[in-house]
Image: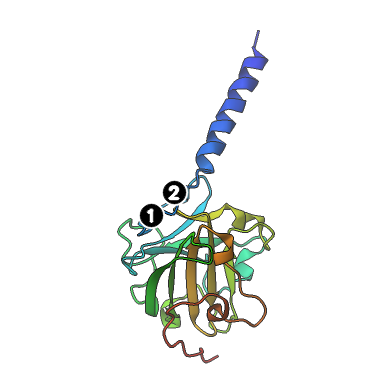
């Protein structure tokens, strides 16, 4: 006779263990000063972004999966953003950006509003090296907060930090990825606000794209 109770108990233990591994958040105590957490794969369906505050050439960011796609479109049903890896990312991710994806960029580490600390990568997008983006798109953002256009985005996180926000605005060429431990340090732009209006950083001079 098949022991159904044993089978059900085994399945329950398997799903519990799988959920614990997939939900593992990584270091969140703010002790990491360099954020050297570069990953080259999705973990159980998660999309993991990252940056190295001591080396601006090492990062992993979210962008549309297909060419010439608006940021908001990439978050709707039937579409999905993908993690893309920098040319200088030694983990050799499957999807690699052009070496000069940014015309200018800079990383920084700040104390944050309540001292929890955050790290960020900001810069100007070189649209000639970013086929994933629609140059006329006003842009949008990816983040880890529930309630966005796609439930799927809740499976995204920044390695080593509790929260993140990534603002991508092709038309004005601004980009920033900020990873933080205090949600107050990761606000999201709205309406006609530029990334730099809400998330201060060393973007450089980002001239608006001609469309």
Q: Is residue 93 left or right of residue 24?
A: left
Q: Residue at 39% x, 64% y: name it.
A: 59
Q: Which residue is mark 1?
A: 32
- Quarter of the image with the C terminus is bottom right
Q: Which mark is residue 108?
A: none
Residue 64 x, y percent position in the rendering? 53, 67
Q: Residue at 55% x, 84% y: name it.
A: 171
Vertical position of residue 27 compared to residue 84: above or below:
above
Residue 190 x, y percent position in the rendering? 65, 76
Q: Earlier in the sequence, mark 1 or mark 2?
A: 2
Q: Residues within 10 Å of mark 2 (few under 14, many from 20)?
A: some
**Between 120 and 17, which is closer to the camera in this rendering?**
120
Image quarter of residue 130: bottom left
Image quarter of residue 195: bottom right
The residue lying furthest to the top in this view is: 1
Q: Residue at 51% x, 72% y: name it.
A: 67
- Quarter of the image with the N terminus is top right
Residue 13 x, y percent position in the rendering? 58, 26
Q: Count all numbered tags in the image, as a single digit.
A: 2
SS state under label 1: loop
Q: Which residue is mark 2?
A: 27
Image quarter of residue 69: bottom right
**Between 155 and 200, which is closer to the camera in this rendering?**
200
Task: State how far apart marks 1 and 2 are (Cα).
Answer: 8 Å
Asked if disc 1 and disc 2 are in contact, CB closer than 8 Å, the reply is yes
Q: Residue at 50% x, 43% y: name it.
A: 24
The residue lying furthest to the front in this view is: 114
Vertical position of residue 45 compared to residue 114: above or below:
above
Q: Residues within 10 Å of mark 1 (few under 14, many from 20)?
A: few
Residue 183 x, y percent position in the rendering? 58, 61
């Amino acid at each position: 006779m098949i022991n159904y109770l044993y089978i059900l108990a085994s399945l329950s233990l398997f799903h519990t263990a799988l959920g614990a591994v997939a939900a593992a958040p990584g270091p969140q105590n703010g002790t990491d000063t360099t954020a050297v957490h570069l990953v080259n794969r999705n973990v159980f369906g998660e999309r993991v972004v990252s940056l190295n505050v001591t080396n601006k050439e090492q990062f992993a960011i979210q962008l549309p999966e297909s060419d010439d796609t608006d940021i908001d479109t990439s978050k709707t049903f039937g579409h999905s953003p993908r993690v893309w890896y920098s040319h200088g990312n030694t983990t050799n991710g499957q999807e690699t950006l052009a070496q000069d994806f940014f015309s200018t960029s800079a990383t920084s580490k700040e104390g944050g509003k309540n001292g929890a600390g955050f790290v960020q990568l900001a810069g100007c997008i070189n649209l000639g090296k970013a086929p994933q983006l629609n140059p006329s798109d006003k842009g949008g953002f990816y983040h880890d907060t529930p309630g966005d256009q796609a439930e799927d985005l809740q499976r995204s996180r920044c390695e080593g930090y509790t929260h993140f926000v990534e603002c991508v605005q092709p038309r004005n060429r601004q980009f920033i990825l900020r990873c933080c431990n205090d949600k107050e340090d990761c606000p999201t732009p709205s309406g006609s606000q530029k990334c730099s209006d809400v998330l201060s950083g060393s973007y450089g001079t980002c001239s608006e794209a001609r469309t």
